[in-house]
Image (cartoon, grey):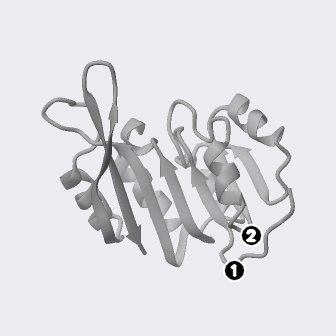
Amino acid sequence: MPKPPHPISPIGLVDGAVPLARHDPAIGPGLLTVKLALFMRDVIAIDTSPAMVDMLQQKEIDNVTSTCVDIDDPAVRSAPWFGEFDLIVASSVCSFLPNYETTLGLLARALRTTGYFVQWDWLASVVQEFGLTLDRVTQAFENADLSRVHIGKAFAAASEDREKPVLIAVAQI
């Protein structure tokens, strides 16, 4: 895949496991990473699962660096890319984190001064207890010194017995 010339670089990708991610498919099979790589100069994709990292590396995308790491590991803060992200994307990640607020604070520090943080997650509701509430996300953004751009219900995913609401939250340093 050719390397696109785009002014935004690098982009951090947290696509589902507990680092810049969560406990299951962080970068997963890399579907979101592949899409984002078309528009970004560089993508750093992170997952705690070596199998998921290997799956993405097999796609051999020129402008994607994938690594197996836990964002909560103190060594991450000395990585050369820490603090250099224009964009961090966490897709179906944060509601699975053992300590969302603490990890969000670390992710916020990984952003450049004008960087953006975007997350999609399950929205907790009366019908669906699992997930994050809009109030919790709003408070976590404030505690991490992130300026809220948008927080709300994006859509609902239909399942056999009910709809599962999904939230989208966008903030800037």
Of the two numbered discs 1 and 2 on the same chain, state the one appearing first in sequence.
1
Front residue of this view, candidates 14 and 3: 3
What residue sits 82% from the left and 51% below the top? 61
Instruction: Please report the residue visible at 65 percent of the width from the left and 75 percent of the height from the top.
Output: 8
- Residue 81, image x and y in percent? 68, 65
The single residue placed furthest to the top in the displayed view is 160
Task: Kindly identify which residue carries mark 1.
Answer: 7
Give the residue displayed 52% in from the left and 39% down from the top: 18
Considering the image in quadrants, where does the N terminus appear?
bottom right
Q: CA distance from mark 1 to mark 2?
A: 7 Å
Circle 2 sits on which residue? 41
| Kind of residue at disc 1 | Pro
Q: Quadrant of the C terminus?
A: bottom left
Q: Which residue is found at the position 68% from the left and 68% from the top? A: 10
* Three-letter code, disc 2: Arg
- Determine the image quadrant of residue 55: top right
- Residue 59: name its quadrant: top right
In the image, residue 52 above or below residue 32: above
Q: Residues within 10 Å of mark 2 (few under 14, many from 20)?
A: some
Please report contact status of discs 1 and 2: CB closer than 8 Å, yes or no: yes
Neighbour class for label 1 at 10 Å: few (<14), some, many (≥20)? few
Tell me the SS state at disc 2.
Answer: loop
Spot occupied by residue 137 in the image (x, y as percentages of width and height): 28, 54
